[in-house]
Image: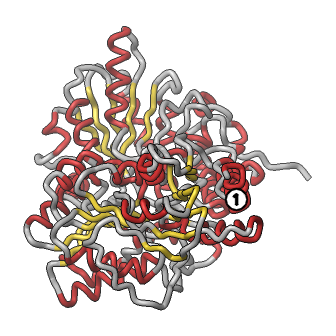
């Protein structure tokens, strides 16, 4: 049987697009969407943002001479069509190669990718740098920044736009306005975008014009003809131009068009069912916090929950948000503002609880230090998904411990079960002396069945779960249960009955307990689900530095890993019971 050729069969590089007719481009858009839906439904990944940007990506590569003309993506939530059109379509057509390419732009993959990008609001700033470098060298290529999908709410987006507008030479900013962030858009800027949509770009009140941009509007950003016409008009401009395009997030997938928040990112198999399948039916550490906040708010309306545009990470469902009403704030993709906002709330007598993913808290380092800790305001921050993972290099979650635990005035806590988590959470909300961060366990819920009555205002007091001798195992947070396995295997192999300790506090050393270990222990080992340099274990090693006590620290190396399987990382870092016990035996 003769195989029917598709339009995509003709496309191996962006240059191949230039021979297509508009009708062929429309067909190609449908083919790309089918590939994205099939691939993402198999592997998981970003769905809605990529489906919405297909025509714009085709038009950009058709009009501009990429890779000579430089295209910078924001977040990379929107780069799948770009990858398909720039020599990497096998990663979408061949199931055996679905995992060959990362879900983010990556210079090591292609000359079409300028930066490895996974966090948000950065494209305009990066593009301004490229454009200025071009001007300094006397170049003539176009520099295009694609931003959108909520990215405009991030502070760096404003900084980038502010500087791009006065560059005085070619820079083209494409604002993809799909009327969404991950959840609903938040902030006054989006009211202006709505006004511009409602007036077909003609409103006198225009944020982008106020900065100085030459402004263009495309009402249908999924119409390839309109996009091509506009992009041709701005190509080779000798001044800063901003093109505002309106697209449909999730276009071509009915479920994603209808429930834009849920289908922003999906797990494998979600498109096989019309039901929302990634909502957990059992208790999770996310649901525990949600239930706590709702109950606390019933009794105390000064309790307020905050999310920097990632409510799904913390289980802040639409139902949860509706119940809290004005006592819930989504600040947009603005972690810096979120931390300072929480500090201000605490100073004003409210009880803020900010929920943020580990990978994103680093975006607010200065605010953690200056706006929060320096002022010693009693805000509460819940850090989710902290730990060693096999994620993309852009979303590693192993750096929060050294980042947070070395800032003065912050108490960083690591519960190991439900009871500790609830007790720490309640103490953190009610106390007034410290800025408190809790590393939410990144594992299935463990319940001891015994209420925790610890007074956490007595700082840096560790819990001795089991007394022993010769070896002391400090298992922090997620890795407390790895410590249990190490203790049992060590007993089986050597007869040593080790002490097992739950530190609970990441930010300090229980000096009294550490001194007591010197009496009948030769070796202390620390286990932490994060990077070692600057981490918890180094504090323990430093404490024992001038003594005869030997210390072994187990955790991750300081490196950017990219989609390395977790089992492989655990083997690399000696984070299995067998490898840890071998190291203990060698040390003894």
* Residue at the limit of the structure toward the left, as seen here: 348
* Above or below, comparing residue 467 to residue 210 in the picture: below
Q: Nearer the viewer, residue 5 or 552?
A: 552
Quarter where residue 102 is shown: top right
* Residue at the limit of the structure toward the front, as seen here: 519
- Horizontal relation, residue 500 to residue 171: left or right: right
* Above or below, comparing residue 452 to residue 109 in the picture: below
Percent x, y of residue 584 = 67, 55
Percent x, y of residue 301 = 15, 83
Percent x, y of residue 329 = 23, 68
Quarter where residue 186 is shown: bottom left
* Above or below, comparing residue 250 to residue 113 in the picture: below
Write down the residue under mark 1: 581
Quarter where residue 461 is shown: bottom left
Q: Secondary structure at mark 1?
A: helix
Please say whether residue 92 is visible from this viewpoint: no
Please say whether residue 51 is visible from this viewpoint: yes
- Colour mapping: secondary structure
Please report the residue visible at 67 percent of the width from the left and 56 percent of the height from the top.
580
Q: Nearer the viewer, residue 167 or 230?
A: 167
Query: Callout 1: 10 Å neighbours few (<14), some, many (20+)?
Result: many
Please report the residue visible at 36 percent of the width from the left and 8 percent of the height from the top.
138
- Horizontal relation, residue 545 to residue 147: left or right: right
Percent x, y of residue 312 = 42, 69
């Amino acid at each position: 049987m003769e195989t029917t050729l598709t339009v995509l069969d003709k496309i191996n590089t962006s240059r191949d697009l230039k021979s297509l007719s508009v009708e062929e481009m429309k067909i190609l858009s449908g083919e790309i969407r089918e590939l994205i839906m099939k691939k993402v439904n198999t592997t998981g990944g970003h769905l809605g943002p990529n489906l919405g940007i297909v025509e714009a990506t085709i038009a950009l590569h058709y009009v501009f001479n990429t890779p000579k003309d430089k295209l910078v993506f924001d977040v990379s939530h929107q780069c799948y069509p770009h990858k398909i059109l720039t020599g990497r379509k096998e990663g979408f057509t061949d199931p055996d190669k679905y995992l060959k390419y990362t879900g983010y732009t990556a210079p090591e993959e292609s000359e079409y990718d300028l930066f490895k990008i996974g966090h948000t609001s950065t494209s305009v700033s990066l593009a301004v740098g490229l454009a200025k470098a071009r001007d300094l060298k006397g170049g003539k290529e176009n520099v295009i920044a694609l931003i959108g999908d909520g990215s405009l709410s991030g502070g760096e987006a404003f900084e980038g736009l502010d500087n791009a507008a006065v560059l005085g030479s070619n820079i083209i900013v494409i604002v993809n306005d799909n009327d969404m962030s991950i959840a609903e858009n938040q902030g006054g800027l989006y009211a202006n975008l709505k006004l511009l949509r409602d007036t077909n770009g003609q409103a006198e009140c225009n944020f982008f014009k106020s900065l100085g941009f030459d402004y263009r509007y495309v009402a249908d950003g999924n119409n390839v003809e309109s996009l091509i016409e506009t992009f041709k008009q701005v190509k080779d401009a000798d001044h800063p131009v901003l093109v505002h395009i309106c697209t449909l997030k999730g276009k071509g997938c009915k479920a994603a068009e209808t429930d834009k928040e849920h289908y922003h990112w999906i797990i494998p198999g979600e498109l096989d069912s019309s039901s929302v399948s990634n909502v957990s039916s059992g208790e999770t550490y996310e649901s525990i916090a949600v239930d706590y906040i709702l109950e606390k708010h019933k009794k105390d309306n000064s309790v307020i929950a905050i999310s920097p545009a990632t409510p799904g990470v913390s289980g802040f469902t639409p139902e949860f948000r509706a119940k809290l009403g004005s006592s819930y704030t989504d600040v947009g993709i603005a972690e810096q503002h979120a931390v300072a906002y929480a500090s201000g709330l605490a100073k004003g007598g409210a009880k803020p609880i900010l929920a943020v993913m580990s990978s994103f808290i680093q975006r607010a380092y200065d605010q953690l230090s200056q706006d929060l800790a320096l002022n010693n305001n009693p805000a509460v921050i819940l850090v989710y998904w902290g730990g060693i993972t096999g994620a993309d290099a852009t979303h590693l979650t192993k750096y929060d411990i050294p980042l947070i635990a070395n800032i003065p005035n912050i108490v960083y806590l690591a519960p190991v079960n439900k009871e500790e988590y609830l007790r720490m959470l309640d103490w953190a909300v009610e106390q007034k002396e410290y800025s408190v961060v809790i590393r939410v366990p990144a594992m299935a819920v463990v319940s001891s069945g015994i209420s925790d009555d610890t007074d956490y205002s007595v700082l840096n007091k560790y819990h001795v779960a089991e007394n022993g001798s010769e070896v002391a195992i400090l298992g922090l947070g997620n890795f407390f249960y790895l410590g249990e396995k190490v203790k049992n295997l060590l007993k089986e192999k050597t007869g040593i009955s080790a002490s097992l300790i739950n530190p609970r506090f990441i930010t300090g050393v229980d000096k009294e307990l550490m001194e007591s270990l010197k009496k009948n222990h030769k070796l202390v080992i620390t286990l932490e689900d994060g990077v070692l340099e600057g981490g918890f274990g180094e504090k323990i090693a430093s404490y024992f530095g001038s003594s005869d006590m030997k210390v072994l620290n187990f955790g991750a190396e300081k490196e950017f890993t990219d989609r390395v399987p977790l089992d492989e990382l655990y083997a690399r870092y000696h984070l299995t019971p067998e490898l840890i016990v071998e190291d203990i035996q060698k040390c003894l």
